[in-house]
Amino acid sequence: MTVLNCVSARLSRLGTASVLTATAVALPTLLPGTAQPAEAATAAVKALNVAASKKGSPYQWGATGPSRFDCSGLTLYSFKRAGKKLPRTAAAQYNSSRHISAKARRVGDLVFFHTGRSVYHVGIYAGHGRIWHAPKTGARVRLERIWSGGVWYGRVA
């Protein structure tokens, strides 16, 4: 049996749905430039996992880790460990991120809390309306429900 016949026989056994799934998974790695969104998503998920690994670390204003954090220090540290650069403050992180709608948000996106046009807090979206963040003095890094409608979302490129 030739290689082509062997591949053809296996594909016919897989069925159309399986072939389409395999194509969707394999195709981005074969075409230059199409894997970038997946790479960005991977970095965002890595950053989220780094933030989650810091659960219980104490808040300290101005701290960027590895054992104490303020809100933007946690996001800066998490994305740095995932291979992405962010500026130091929540407002600067908002300005450097790609702004997205709430409907477009994904796990690993940044969640910015604001009053008017001023950003005052940032966390990493964990799904299901929750974020990982370093809340305030006296608190520790934790997973918490988004408590305000005054939020904007940003994606790290």
Image (cartoon, rainbow, N blue to C red):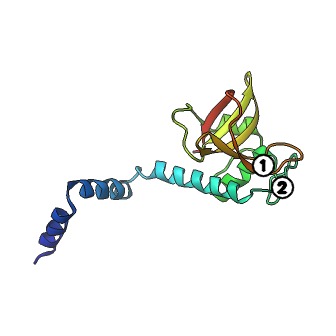
Tell me residue 75's x, y (percent): 71, 48
- Residue at image position (30%, 55%) is 21
Tell me residue 149's x, y (percent): 67, 27
86 to 103, vertically: above or below: below
Q: Specify whether 46 is left or right of 32.
A: right
Say which residue label 1 marks.
73
Q: In which quadrant is the N terminus drawn?
A: bottom left
Is residue 83 visible to us here?
no
Is residue 128 visible to us here?
yes
- Residue at image position (76%, 44%) is 72
Q: Do the residues labelled 1 and 2 touch (CB within 8 Å)?
A: yes
Say which residue label 2 marks.
68
Secondary structure of residue under mark 2? loop
Tell me residue 12's x, y (percent): 15, 63
Tell me residue 54's x, y (percent): 74, 58
Closer to the camera in the image, 41 or 97: 41
Tag 1: amino acid: Gly
Secondary structure of residue under mark 1? helix
